[in-house]
Amino acid sequence: MQTLPSDTESVSESVPQITPQITIDLLVILEKDPYLYFLVDKKYPLPSNYEPDDLIPLRNAPNISYRVNRNDLSLRREAVEALEEMAAAALREAGLTLVVSSTYRSYAYQTTVYNRYVNQYGRAQADRFSARPGHSQHQLGTAADFGSITNAFAETPEGRWIYNNASRFGWSLSYPQGYEEITGYMWESWHYRYVGKELAKFIDDYFEGIQQYALEYIFRFLNQNKTS
């Protein structure tokens, strides 16, 4: 379980109060893999040596419904299964083929990515769209970037379909438009995190689809119960 740092006031208060029903739904989520609801943001990092032990390479193949545009992509096993389920539905329901452009990144790889952006744009600007090492959801092995990795993706048929359907398959948009002050990052219409169907529904039902609020709520719930 994550440990609550001393700056507890940084955890958002813009969340529902604990009620019997939300507690019941939350307890179901807490029975799942804790890394599905692990809070990874600008304040709370993963250990630098964290690497999932069930990463599966993603490959283009006739029996796969999605496509990848690189040969070095991988996700955790459960996320791969959920990706295929979502991609198959997109193909079946709308005739769309989802393209995966970025997935798991190690701590070392994220260091390279972040430093490159700092060199290009300066640290203040880079921090708006690139996570510092240890603070990237990609290190979890459950985050995927789709399509062009630009916000033009939001206006494509694939972007609209994922936005409207991702939570059915356990995926959640991490950095929605207009929430930079909450998430710490600019709008990224292409970046989705697999959190599981139960948590994705929890995010929609109680937090109007805002993943950050839900993860902070769980973080606070766990630590309040730990200290009570």
Image (spheres, grey):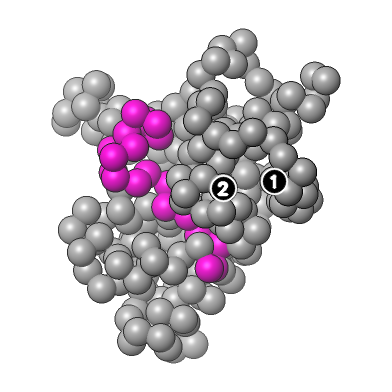
Mark 2 crowd level (few <14, some 14–19, many ≥20, 10 Å Cα):
some
Say which residue appears at 72% left-offset and 25% top-offset. 223
Label 1: how many Cα within 10 Å (few below 14, some 14–19, many 20+): some
- Residue at the top extreme? 6
Quarter of the picture holding the N terminus: top right
Which amino acid is tagged 2?
Tyr
Q: What residue is drawn where x is 49% and y is 39%?
A: 212
Q: Quick one: which residue is furthest to the right in this view?
A: 228
- Whether 181 is among the magenta residues is yes
74 versus 105 height, above or below: below
Question: Who comes first in sequence, dot 2 or dot 1?
Answer: 1
The x and y percentages for residue 199 are 62, 53
Q: Amino acid at mark 1?
A: Ile
Q: Which mark is residue 188?
A: none
The quarter holding residue 177 reads top left
Residue ID at (69%, 35%): 18
Q: Which residues are magenta?
A: 168-187
Q: Is residue 188 visible?
A: yes
Residue at left 46%, top 45%?
Answer: 210
Which x, y percent locates residue 188? 30, 48
- Residue highlighted by disc 1: 22
Check the image and report above or below for 67 versus 22: below
Horizontal side of residue 217 vs 184, given as left or right? right
Pointer 2: what residue? 206
